Image: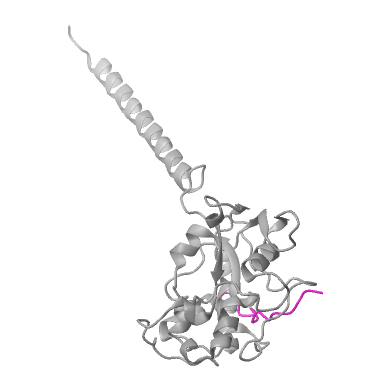
């Protein structure tokens, strides 16, 4: 069979069109996959854009401030940061959690242990064990570190989903001045509502004893409050910061220069 030049050109044109259609389809599939895994149903580790920008400290009527080494200065967080001592870490090989007293003491004397105080403060519509005004059994909240809505249900298999984080980790505090505090001052640091936030369990485990130089909340909307809260705790308990930590805090605060320190006063 003899193929004319016209037929040859027509066949080449159809071939090019077919390849263009195939390439366009491939790009569409690739774009869909990118959306699916970054913004769609299976987005991995992506914080909610509606995540909270702050977290409470005290609840009126039943929570009381804990006596710190000194009052938190009321000023821009960046200004107070510049008043903190800057130096390297002390040794951690002698750190023991027991140096901060028994976990979840009732330091403020309201009759409930600190863990349940923080759950009651942070959860929406907290439920209690029948006959108890302290022991929280459930509730939901928009968690500040990830921005996700999380449900808390007390139980051996479920309680760890919501953990109480020390904003300034006790291991970090131990290496930055807490060794020089009295035993009572360390107890107060470990149970001060200023230093405690109910958070996503895996995010808390990921943070561990990190400072701002090595870990920040995935929810970017919360970072200014988080750094200001760390500065406030360190100022209240006369703890220092490392050079890298201070630099990381300053970098965050450049986006929110009006961010104030977090002062533990009951809401009115």
Q: Residue at x 63, y 71 (%)?
A: 114
Helix, strand or loop: magenta stretch: loop
Residue 128 in the figure: left or right of residue 254: right
* Nearer to me, 260 or 62: 62
Q: Residue 164: percent from the left, percent from the top?
A: 57, 66
Query: Number of labelled discs?
Result: 0
Position of residue 230 relative to residue 35, above or below, is below
Please give the name of the residue rendered at 45% of the width and 79% of the height, measured from the top-left corner: 172
Q: Quadrant of the C terminus?
A: bottom right
Q: Is residue 248 visible?
A: no
Whether residue 62 is visible to the viewer of this picture, yes or no, is yes
Question: Is the image coloured rainbow, by chain, by secondary structure, or in one colour?
Answer: one colour
Given the current orientation, which residue lies at the most extreme top position?
1
- What is the residue that sits farthest to the front in this orientation? 131
Q: Give the vertical position of 148 relative to 245 (above or below).
A: above
Q: Is residue 221 magenta?
A: no
Write the start and end of the magenta stretch as one range. Answer: 254-268
Across and down, in percent, residue 29 comes to 41, 35
Residue 267 highlighted magenta (yes or no): yes
Residue 17 is drawn in which quadrant? top left
Which corner quadrant holds the N terminus? top left
Query: Residue at horizontal 65%, vertical 89%?
Result: 73
Residue 176 image offset from top left, x and y in percent:
45, 86
Does residue 118 appear left or right of residue 247 in this picture? right
Of 255 and 215, which appears nearest the observer? 215
Q: Write down the quadrant of residue 182 in the picture.
A: bottom right
Q: Is residue 16 left or right of residue 149?
A: left
Q: Position of residue 12 (x, y in %)?
A: 27, 23
Q: Is residue 250 above or below residue 166?
A: below
């Amino acid at each position: 069979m003899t193929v004319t030049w016209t037929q040859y050109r027509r066949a080449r044109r159809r071939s090019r069109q077919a390849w263009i259609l195939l390439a366009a389809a491939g790009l569409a599939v690739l774009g869909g996959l990118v959306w699916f895994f970054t913004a769609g149903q299976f987005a991995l580790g992506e914080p909610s854009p509606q995540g909270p920008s702050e977290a409470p400290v005290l609840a009126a009527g039943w929570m009381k401030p804990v006596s710190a080494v000194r009052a938190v200065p009321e000023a821009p967080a960046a200004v107070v940061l510049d008043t903190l001592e800057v130096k390297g870490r002390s040794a951690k090989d002698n750190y023991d959690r027991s140096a901060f007293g028994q976990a979840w003491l009732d330091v403020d004397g309201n009759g409930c242990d600190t863990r349940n105080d923080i759950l009651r403060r942070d959860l929406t519509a907290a439920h209690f064990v029948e006959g108890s005004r302290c022991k929280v059994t459930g509730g939901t909240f928009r968690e500040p570190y990830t921005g996700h809505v999380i449900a808390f249900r007390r139980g051996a298999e479920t309680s760890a989903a919501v953990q109480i984080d020390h904003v300034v980790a006790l291991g970090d505090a131990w290496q930055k001045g807490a060794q020089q505090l009295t035993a009572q001052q360390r107890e107060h640091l470990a149970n001060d509502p200023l230093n405690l936030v109910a958070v996503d369990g895996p995010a808390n485990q990921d943070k561990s004893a990190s400072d701002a130089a090595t870990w920040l909340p995935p929810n970017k909307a919360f970072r200014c409050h988080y750094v200001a809260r760390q500065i406030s705790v360190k100022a209240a308990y006369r703890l220092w910061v490392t050079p890298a930590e201070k630099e990381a805090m300053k970098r965050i605060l450049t986006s929110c220069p009006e961010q104030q320190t977090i002062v533990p006063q009951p809401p009115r």
